């Protein structure tokens, strides 16, 4: 793991480059005056750097592990990436420093204290050793994810007023830029081929801009759009434009302009023009690309690739446009199965959403209130403009006694209305949630109700049992004022239940799904799934029986195998009898998003009517992100022919932070710029993250690190090559705690980097072991520093810039010397003699050594 250099103005004394330390120690150890004549002019010196110490020998072969960069997931929420090392037997160790940083204060004080005791100050610990009552740690070999399953009692819900995390130590954080901006741009070109004819689709150029004024907690302005080169001419489609501000201590966000209306339960929402005030205890929107928008629905803010994982197996990969989608739109049996959505947007961001999160079984701590209120105008989807009535929408929840949460909400406008109520109860059997709503839309009344239940039992030896039940019913005329047309509620009722048993290496689950419709055939599904992890191989098997569209029942089998081939490479095979008899084989290399990283996938698929070959490759450059994708499908039916889709995409960003400009990979969530001082011209900067990966490089332009999350502490370290040996960089780490779209400017280098060596005497005798103060005569910003002489009168002063300096004793100047602007590194100011007549700056009165 990357270990940043030490802090302080004299960092160069004990960290590379080590030459300055050798010079200082040699100079102060001398007992005779220097050879240079008495003078207050500078003379240059040079030293040869010592040889680098040999690198430590590698671990014995039997101790070697494969290092992985894996997601850390707490109760289905992705906290960030963490380093995990896996040995040949499949045993994993986890980076405990990064683990505790990602957890912050999400755990209760007792759970965090117990975890720190388990760690015992070690930097790496086998992951299975961290499990304890109500807190299960495991590494999933099938998905290459590190999981933490925490019971409610082990979560620090009483700290939700600061987003579920303790307040960071802002004193040790770098201050953000007062004015920061990022303009992210993507050029996307798609080619399609069908029936032997190739067609170029319209060229698309997407712009996603953000400007933040005021630093952390400042005002954020978002804008953008999509330019398309259509055959009929060019077209500009404006993206949402808004102003927002977050209030960290109260967890409140205020928005004005265009935004997605925050909703809950059976409320409906989407893009709107107006104002909104909401409280977000989950971290002020940690997901910028995807977020819930009512019961069983999800909103995408931009073009994305959506990957559907069912019981840990990838079943679909779709390109989807911005909009609001019901879970059924993703084509997965989300009720009885464990389903996750992985969303990759055009700017390379990867989000994970678990569909099990979006139910009403949410308990708040006693006295905690959650709310969202907005007044906005919905768009006219036919004209692309905002029209129609202004609609008021809102909800309110409050916790009572840690076991009881009550809430309600409503939406009103245009003569239509919706009112809802929520109740959550926590008891020993589990958490029970009840939601009910009534509506009045165009003179017709409607109703809806839902029940959610979750029971979880944590056993010994990393074993747990989870039972969930979700049921809802909707009347034919139930509707929301946000709808532009009367409802066509085909669904009468739906019931989903799932029983799941988990251990460190195995998972067994039984799911039941039943759904009845008004005009469509009823659905029934019963399925059993099992997963098992071995050393490098993991398996997933699903056996099910379901009712078909014509009323008959049939069985299906889903079998998946995953073989880990290397640190970030794996091979997957999938067999699905529902496709029908679909067979898929792919080899994937996972991205770690370091500079120069190349990742991608090659897939071969076949079913009874089609064969397909597809693949993509992603390149993470220092200043850009490139994506190339090709998909070919061959048809076996009588019509024949092939279909091909090719996509070429390049993304980059222009960033600004308090006067520093640069180019970078897309940075819609914020960034850190590392401009270099003029005294380091020609030097190269390398920035690394906490795992030691190269996050950015600087040369002609400043290095820029795009931030991967908000309201999460991050630490980066940098080193500089080509700098003078005695250069004092100060603190070479950047600790940040970014807010919404925060930009940082971390200046590397300064004019105060030169080192002066000299010899003080009086009447020819050395001024031995005396203490003086050094002041600048030309730079008012220079902070006076204390200097000392050794037994030979030798002194040294560091962190000096060009200009005139005076040496002061008892508040009286006694000597002067000059640091020239054109001299670098170590400067010998020679022998300076202090006489009684003041020829060298001495004055009457008390004199050193007298």
Image (cartoon, grey):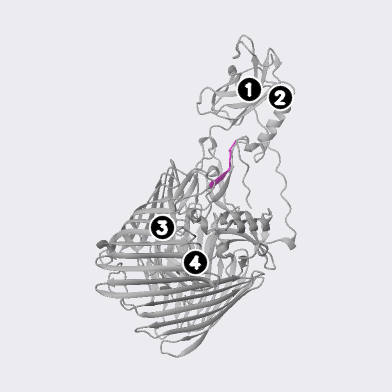
Q: Give the distance between the C-alpha atoms of the residues marked 1 and 2, in whole angstroms.
A: 12 Å
**Compared with residue 78, is residue 436 higher up or lower down, i.e. above or below?**
below
**Compared with residue 190, is residue 219 higher up or lower down, i.e. above or below?**
above
Q: Is residue 641 left or right of residue 606?
A: left
Q: Point out the frontmost of discs 3 and 1.
A: 1
Camera-side residue: 493 or 598? 493
The verdict on residue 730 being magenta is yes
Q: Is residue 729 left or right of residue 290?
A: right
Q: Point out the frontmost of discs 1 and 2.
A: 1
**Compared with residue 230, is residue 633 higher up or lower down, i.e. above or below?**
below
Q: Which mark is residue 790?
A: 2
Q: Give the distance between the C-alpha atoms of the residues marked 4 and 1, in whole angstroms.
A: 66 Å
Which residue in the structure is indicated by mark 4?
616
Quadrant occupied by the C terminus: top right
Dot 4 lies on which element?
strand
Q: Quadrant location of residue 517?
A: bottom left
Which residue in the structure is indicated by mark 1?
772
Q: Give the distance between the C-alpha atoms of the residues marked 3 and 1, in whole angstroms.
A: 59 Å
Which residue in the structure is indicated by mark 3?
186
Which range of residues does the magenta coloring cover? 728-735
The verdict on residue 767 being magenta is no
- Looking at this view, name the residue that lies furthest to the top: 837
- Give yes or no for contact between labels 3 and 1 (Cβ–Cβ under 8 Å): no
Q: Give the distance between the C-alpha atoms of the residues marked 2 and 4, in whole angstroms.
A: 66 Å
> x, y (%) of residue 298?
41, 67
Q: Does label 1 or label 2 sit earlier along the sequence?
A: 1
Camera-side residue: 624 or 728? 728
Q: Is residue 159 left or right of residue 264?
A: right
Q: Is residue 226 visible?
A: no
Q: Residues within 10 Å of mark 1 (few under 14, many from 20)?
A: some
Q: Give the distance between the C-alpha atoms of the residues marked 2 and 3, in whole angstroms.
A: 62 Å
């Amino acid at each position: 793991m990357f270990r940043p250099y030490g802090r302080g103005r004299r960092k160069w004394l004990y960290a590379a480059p080590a030459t300055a330390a050798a010079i200082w120690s040699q100079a102060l150890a001398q007992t005779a005056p220097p050879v240079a004549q008495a003078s207050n002019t500078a003379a240059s010196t040079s030293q040869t750097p010592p040889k680098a110490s040999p690198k430590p020998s590698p671990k014995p072969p039997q101790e070697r592990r494969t290092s992985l960069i894996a997601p850390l997931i707490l109760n289905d929420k992705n906290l960030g990436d963490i380093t995990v090392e896996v040995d040949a037997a499949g045993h994993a160790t986890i980076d405990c420093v990064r683990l505790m940083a990602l957890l912050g204060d999400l755990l209760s004080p007792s759970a965090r204290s117990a975890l720190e005791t388990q760690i015992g100050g070690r930097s790496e610990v086998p992951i299975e050793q961290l499990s304890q009552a109500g807190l299960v740690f495991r590494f999933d070999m099938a998905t290459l994810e590190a999981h933490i399953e925490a019971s409610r009692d082990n979560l620090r819900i009483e700290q939700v007023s600061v987003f579920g995390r303790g307040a960071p130590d802002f004193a040790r954080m770098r201050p953000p830029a007062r004015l920061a901006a990022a303009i992210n741009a993507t050029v996307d070109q798609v080619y399609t081929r069908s029936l032997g004819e190739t067609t170029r689709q319209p060229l698309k150029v997407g712009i996603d801009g953000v400007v933040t004024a005021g630093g952390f907690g400042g005002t954020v302005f978002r804008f953008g759009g999509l330019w398309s080169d259509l055959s009929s001419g060019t077209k500009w489609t404006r993206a949402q434009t808004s102003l927002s501000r977050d209030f960290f201590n109260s967890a409140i966000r205020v928005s004005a302009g265009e935004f997605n209306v925050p909703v809950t339960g059976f409320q409906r929402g989407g893009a709107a023009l107006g104002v909104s005030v909401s409280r977000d205890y989950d971290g002020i929107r940690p997901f910028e690309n995807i977020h819930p928008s009512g019961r069983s629905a999800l909103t995408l803010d931009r073009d994305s690739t959506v990957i559907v994982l069912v019981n840990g197996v990838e079943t679909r990969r779709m390109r989807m446009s911005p909009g609001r989608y019901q879970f059924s739109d993703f084509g997965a049996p989300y009720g009885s199965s464990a389903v996750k959505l992985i969303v990759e947007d055009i700017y390379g961001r990867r989000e994970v959403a678990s569909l099990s999160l979006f139910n009403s079984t949410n308990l708040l701590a006693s006295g905690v209130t959650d709310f969202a209120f907005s007044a906005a105008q919905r768009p006219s989807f036919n004209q692309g403009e905002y029209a129609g009535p202004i609609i008021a929408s809102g909800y309110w929840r409050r916790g009572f006694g840690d076991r009881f949460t009550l809430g309600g909400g409503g939406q009103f406008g245009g003569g239509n209305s919706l009112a809802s109520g929520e109740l959550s109860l926590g008891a020993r059997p589990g958490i029970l949630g009840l939601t009910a709503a009534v509506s009045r839309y165009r003179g017709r009344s409607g109703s809806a109700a839902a029940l959610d239940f979750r029971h979880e039992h944590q056993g010994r030896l990393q074993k747990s049992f989870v039972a969930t039940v979700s049921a809802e019913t909707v009347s034919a005329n139930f509707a929301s004022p946000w709808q532009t047309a009367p409802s066509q509620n085909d669904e009468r009722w739906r019931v989903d239940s799932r029983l799941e048993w988990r251990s460190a290496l195995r998972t067994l689950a039984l799911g039941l799904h039943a759904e009845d419709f008004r005009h469509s055939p009823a659905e029934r599904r019963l399925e059993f799934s099992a997963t098992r992890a071995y050393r490098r191989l993991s398996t997933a098997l699903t056996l099910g029986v379901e009712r078909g569209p014509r009323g008959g029942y049939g069985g299906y089998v889903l079998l998946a195998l995953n073989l880990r081939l290397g640190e970030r490479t794996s091979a997957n095979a999938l067999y699905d009898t529902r496709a029908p008899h679909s067979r898929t084989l792919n080899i994937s290399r996972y991205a770690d998003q370091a500079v120069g990283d190349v990742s991608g996938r090659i897939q071969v698929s076949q079913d009874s009517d089609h064969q397909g070959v597809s693949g993509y490759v992603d390149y993470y450059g220092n200043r850009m992100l490139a994506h190339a994708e090709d998909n070919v499908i061959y048809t076996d039916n009588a019509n024949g022919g092939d279909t091909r889709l090719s996509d070429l995409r390049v993304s980059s960003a222009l960033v600004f932070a308090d006067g520093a400009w640069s180019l970078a990979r897309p940075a819609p969530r914020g960034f850190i710029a590392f401009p270099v001082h003029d005294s380091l011209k020609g030097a190269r900067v390398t920035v690394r993250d906490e795992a030691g990966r190269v996050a950015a490089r600087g040369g002609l332009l400043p290095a820029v690190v795009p931030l991967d999350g908000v309201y999460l502490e991050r630490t980066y370290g940098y080193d500089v090559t080509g700098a003078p040996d005695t250069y004092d960089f100060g603190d070479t780490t950047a600790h940040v705690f970014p807010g919404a779209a925060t930009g940082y400017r971390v200046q590397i280098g300064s004019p105060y980097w030169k080192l002066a060596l000299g010899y003080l005497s009086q009447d020819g005798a050395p001024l031995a072991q005396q203490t003086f103060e050094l002041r600048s005569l030309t730079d008012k910003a220079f902070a006076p520093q204390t200097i000392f002489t050794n037994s030979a009168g030798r002194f040294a002063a560091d962190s000096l810039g060009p200009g005139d300096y005076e040496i002061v004793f008892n508040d009286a100047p006694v000597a002067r010397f000059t640091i020239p602007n054109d001299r670098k590194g170590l400067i010998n100011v020679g022998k300076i003699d202090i006489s009684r007549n003041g020829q060298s700056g001495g004055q009457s009165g008390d004199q050193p050594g007298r």
